[in-house]
Image (cartoon, helix red, strand yellow):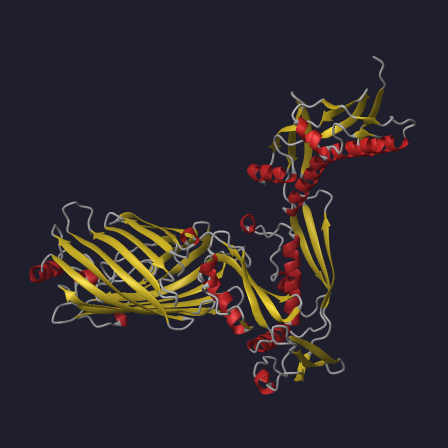
Amino acid sequence: MQFKRYSLRAASLVAALLLAAHMAWAAEPFKIRDIQVEGLQRVEPGTVFASMPLRVGDTYNDEKGTASIRALFALGLFTDVRLEINGDVLVVVVEERPSVAGVEFIGTREFDKDMLTKAMRDIGLAEGRPFDKALLDRAEQELKRQYINKSLYAAEVVSTVTPVERNRVSLAFTVIEGEPAKISEIRIVGNKAFSESTLRNLFDLDTGNWMSWYTKSDRYSRAKLNADIETMRSYYLARGYLEFRIDSTQVAIAPNKQDISITHNVTEGERFVVAGVRLAGNYLGREDEFKALVSIRPGEAYNADRVAETTKAFTDYFGRFGYAFARVQSVPEIDRSTSRVTLVLQAEPSRRAYVRRINVAGNNRTRDEVIRREFRQYESSWYDSDRIRLSRNRVDRLGYFSEVTMETTEVPGTPDQVDLTMKVVERPTGSLTLGAGFSSSEGLGLTFGISQQNAFGSGHSLGLQVNTSKINRLIVVNTTDPYFTQDGVSRTIDLYQRVSRPYYYEDSYALETVGTSLRFGIPFTERDTVYVGAGVERTTIVPGTYLPVAYQNYADQFGYASTAVPLTLGWGRDNRDSALVPTSGNLQRATAEWSTFGEVRYVRGTYNYQHFVPLTKQYTFAFNTDLALGQGIDGRPYPLFKNFYGGGLGSVRGFEAGSLGPRDSATGLTYGGPKKINFNVELQAPFPGAGNDRTLRVYTFVDAGNVYGPDDPIDAANFRVGGGVGISWISPMGPLRLAFARPIRQFEGDRIQYLQFQIGTTF
């Protein structure tokens, strides 16, 4: 049979198109009786047929042939495509791209290999995917860029493609990371008012010290450099240098790619003093109210922080009346002859707006309702900046998010409406608490606690505490529903069992307590919460050796087992700027407990006050006090098993936990008392070499306090006093505090404990 065989061949899509457009001859149009595909290995024939614009029964021409080649190349599955005509049969001959057999990373210590494998998969280089040399080159360059971001400028990345059986290739990225480039010099040129060392101390980047292995402050980072530049600019602008500018910043890398030098060229300008402040524009007829918000003081040096504070206060005050788009600008009128400046605060309230919709973004685990119930700005109501700020702060105080921001956007086509978007960044809300202490009498005592503040994204908290000490054993299970009612009343349920055995011996006496309690938290204001509750507990004095006389007398009079039904009332207010690393504000808590039912009758109360004062950006002064008092009622003595204890972390450091207070005359054992008083002061400072890093700090402290019996007067002459130094570290497992303390004032028989640490406490 006579037939003609024509071929259109292309090494690439461009070559195919050129060949089709410029070939010297063309195939005669014909009706396609059949289409055959040759060269397929892994690609399904249906993929080829579905991509081509030609079908059996169509009339073939060169234009349709070119379109078919273009469509098949666009799949990215083939390195070569050609069309052959065998009579009235169209034969599609393809050469498949090799597939990726695997991706391997060699020498990558700085990055996790699983993370790199995922990154390669995201860009298309993964096992089973078609191999693309362009993607390989892009991946190699991106990997080099990531190493540069980590100051590893000497890193070398070489990609290798190894053919394997069945038209596959194995990819390997071989990396020689080298040593990270470090900052060897930071220079500031043009400074006159402040010394170079003073300015360098403001920076997060430095030339390194003995703590650089932790802070990595000597590793160059563009983001940190920009932050340092802004810090220096703010420092000058806050001290009167209105025209200060940074002319240029040069970052130079030595030929060995190991040393980096940074040079800032600055022009300070003159120092200006504020001559006066003037209001201009539309202030809604409330000029006197706005003037009260001005924090800029004539006669003082120009301070950009005060100016920003004032303009923000003006904008927020406009927002209280619904003016979401108010613009406030500070326009300086400079008199260079006297180095004085008059600030004109120009205001334009624009138009009043109300909130159409409030969106929530970033909460992948936390339910929307958990966030929305904290809002105080509502949809379809007037825009109120105070309520918006309060909403943001309430969500932030939940503790479920590392970052909370609120964005305002205009509604297109509706100038008097805005949409609000609250963006959150979730953080792990589970916490692990570990504690330990060692003493000659008790040995090593361990405490363990685990809690989840946002269980299953519901906002509920679940907790478990366990103490494995041979002397004091404890297990507590609790759960809190922060919105038991729609009005924000919380509910907490506790189940607990405590066993206190003062000696290791199995036949020594013990105190066993089993109980449960139910508490409700009622929010009276945005900052004040009142707690009410009730509980039932059963306490048993287990007879044994070394039973104190006081306990024996109590058991003889009221029995070895007794039941109490305590009613509780509490109040709390938290004004701290951070619950994790507070630097300002205060925390107050007060509780009262009253048992009028059962065999045990008593009343007792506690009060805790913490206050934080920022001395500078790096130093914080902290003060803490704990007061407690108990009294028996209805003619019954205060129950000994409700006594307070002192000593150790959270009390008087340097003394063994629970060792302060009255002692049994026969055994010398401390059994606590109904009166307790503690005072703690701390000076918190940066860890040497850690710079401005607030996750690692040192502190020095002085503690004083004691526990007193029912008939003992509270006398400061009997205070135990301890002092020392410690380390505070926000570790991956939670806040860790390590204290080394020595008694400053001690008495005969006191049990000393020099080293104490705990994970999971903040003071």
- Residue drawn at x 61%, y 37% is 121
- Residue drawn at x 38%, y 62% is 483
**Residue 638 on image: x %, y %:** 17, 67
Position of residue 153 in the picture relative to residue 608 (left or right): right
> Disc count in the image?
0
Position of residue 304 in the picture relative to residue 455 (left or right): right
Residue pushed farthest right? 24
Compare residues 307 and 487 and report the one nearer the observer: 487
Position of residue 691 in the picture relative to residue 233 (left or right): left
Which image quarter is the C terminus in?
bottom left
Compare residues 451 and 543 and report the one nearer the observer: 451
Residue pushed farthest left? 556
**Residue 382 on image: x %, y %:** 55, 74
Residue 611 shows in the view: no
Height in image: 257 above or below 635?
above
Height in image: 303 above or below 450?
below
**Residue 16 on image: x %, y %:** 82, 31
- Which corner quadrant of the image does residue 701 belong to? bottom left
- Which corner quadrant of the image does residue 279 belong to? bottom right
**Residue 745 on image: x %, y %:** 30, 64
- Residue drawn at x 34%, y 66% is 521
Residue 156 shows in the view: yes
Height in image: 593 above or below 164?
below
- Which corner quadrant of the image does residue 288 belong to? bottom right
Compare residues 707 and 514 and report the one nearer the observer: 514
- Residue drawn at x 69%, y 28% is 161
Position of residue 362 in the picture relative to residue 206 (left or right): left
Which image quarter is the N terminus in?
top right
